[in-house]
Amino acid sequence: MLVQSRPVAAIASGAPGLVRSFTLWLLLVPLALGAFVLGEVIHIDVVDLVNAVVYAASAWVALALARLATPGFLDRALWAAWALFCAFFVASELGGDLIEQAELGWSPIWAGDALCWALTGGFIGLLFWRRPQAHVGIAPVMLFAVLGFGLHSLGLAIDIAEVPLRSRLGMDAPSFDNITDLVEFACLQLYLLAFIVLAAELSGQHALRQQIEAAETATGHAATIRAAHLAFATATLMSRRFSPRRRQQAVLALGASSGIGGWLGAIAFTRRMGGFVRAQSGKSLIRQFTEQLTLMHRQRLAPKYYYMFELWQPAQARLAAHYLQRGETKGAAYKVLRRAHTAGSKEEQRLSDKLDFHNRCRALGLPAVPIYFAAGEGRPESDFAAETRLPATDLFIKPRKGCGGNGASRWRFEVAPVTGYRGKDNVLRSPDEMRREIIDRSRRRPLIVQPALVNHPNLADLNCGALATVRIVTCRNEAGGFEVTCAAFRMPRSTNSVVDNFHAGGIAAAIDIATGRLGAATDMGLNPRTAWFERHPVTNAAIRGRILPDWDKVMAVAQRAHAHFDDFTIIGWDIAILADGPCIIEANGAPDLDIIQRTARQPLGDERLGQLMAWHLKRRLRAELLVENG
């Protein structure tokens, strides 16, 4: 049983505690450097004050660990002794001249430093001899401690050789002391970092169970998803099931909404968007910045969402707690809710590989965009080795794996005066040259070749000559069926656009899923020129109020397709509406919900999608995250 206390509440909370503690640790670095510069100017050991803060933080961590349910009395006594040891040195650093006068009575005068060095080395040895075996190391704790001890040894050597070193370097006593204090700070920081990480390891198991319980008992759907995100991040620190990359992503997502990353993000977005919002609302940059920090503290909301979801408006700010963030969905919930199979097995359902996805759709009789040719590693894929010529039609070439429209290109087929394909560079390539270029480019990343589709005639005035698509999100419901929960219509914003991707500069409009009617369109909201459009900014065609053709068929296709990819609880489908009906372009097992929430000006946390996500998480979180830790 864990005995709670203030330091335990801050440190012993798994991944969130690690992020908070690391943020405080990081903020001490510029503080020490500033103190060093100030000390050189006023010739006072200001760094001693910063070192006292580090010692105090170390005592705080040690106290938290002493209160944890560690294996036995000796472990608790060890941490309690370390807390007292650090408290003594807080007094020592703050004592200043009084301590230095007392040290003059020692023989030699560095004997006190040597005793501290020996006790620290002995403590580190005992600590790692008694250290419980964690499921997985968050970071190289021993390495941090050993590096700290190495710097500690260097500092002791400098103290022992102070007189000859000062003479050789021509330094006065205050400057020399300032440098030795900075070396002391560096070794203390390494010690503190080692103990912060160790505290997160030791507290993680209990914190994980608490966070899972918080998710299971949360009353709001968004609150459940947020608590599940914290539990998932802590679980990545505790289990070998998760790769180092997954662990880094989970913790960094927390850092972006609550740690030093959040502070830096607030500064960057205020600089970018502050002037625009000030003109719209009259709010000063300082007020915008503090409101972002308030949302970070209360809702763990990353600063960019303050501008993306227009939370600077009072009406929108009241909904802040219900918005779902990328880190909570893509970084946690989707991973918990996906059914796992052995990689490469026949049962594995892959959406990210566009060739595999196409083949499965075709085999199931789903209306998916055809693939004319595919190449990888500088040669045609086996199924296309016999395809010696490309079809005489406009082509769309994109990476076999990837997102956001990155690496995509459109090629116009021409017959006269010479047959070939012309791209953005305006150079005409013969069919043979085009095929060879595709094969050559596939050495860098595998490519697929598809027809350049054309939208339904009723949408021609919204696509700027490219392809406009529907992003429609389906989710498994309580009865095991699949339902459409939300959708948006994406449009290119320029006649030079190759894709309609929202994150690539396109615009999108919310879709009323009951009727297929569009709302006003907008961009991501993170540009000072952001706007809302009743009509298309290029073609002037009406957007708001327009009803999409074949909307019932679009929903039916998405629901039918999801039943064949039921490893995924949630799927975001990219569907084009063509003259002959809907056509599946791609599917995403971790759909970005920013586009839905931004265009609807409505959070999804307590809408139908949030309700279903929370329902599934409450039933699967414990089994998925405690499967290995018991």
Image: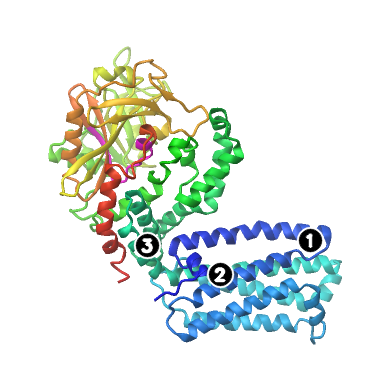
Query: At x 71% / y 73%, what residue is drawn?
Result: 155
Q: Nearer the viewer, mark 3 or mark 2?
A: 3
Mark sitting earlier along the chain (1/2)? 1
Span colored in magenta: 584-597
Q: Is residue 356 visible?
A: yes
Left or right: 419 as drawn, with respect to 178: left
Q: CA distance from mark 3 to mark 2?
A: 28 Å
Could you say which quadrant of the image residue 92 lies in? Answer: bottom right
| Helix, strand or loop at mark 2 | helix
Q: Position of residue 219 (x, y in %)?
A: 32, 54
The image quarter in which residue 601 lies? top left
Of 87 and 411, nearer the camera is: 87
Q: Which residue is mark 2?
A: 144
User: If the image is split into quadrants, where does the N terminus sit?
Assistant: bottom left
Between 324 and 489, the one nearer to me in the picture: 324
Label ID, residue 211? 3
Q: Residue furthest top?
A: 417
In screen coordinates, is 528 left or right of 447?
A: right
Question: Where does label 1 land, which residue?
Answer: 39
Q: Amino acid at mark 1?
A: Gly
Q: Can you give x and y, in whole percent of width and height, for residue 15 in the image? A: 44, 61
User: Which of the two labelled residues, at mark 3 and mark 1, occupies the earlier sequence position?
Assistant: 1
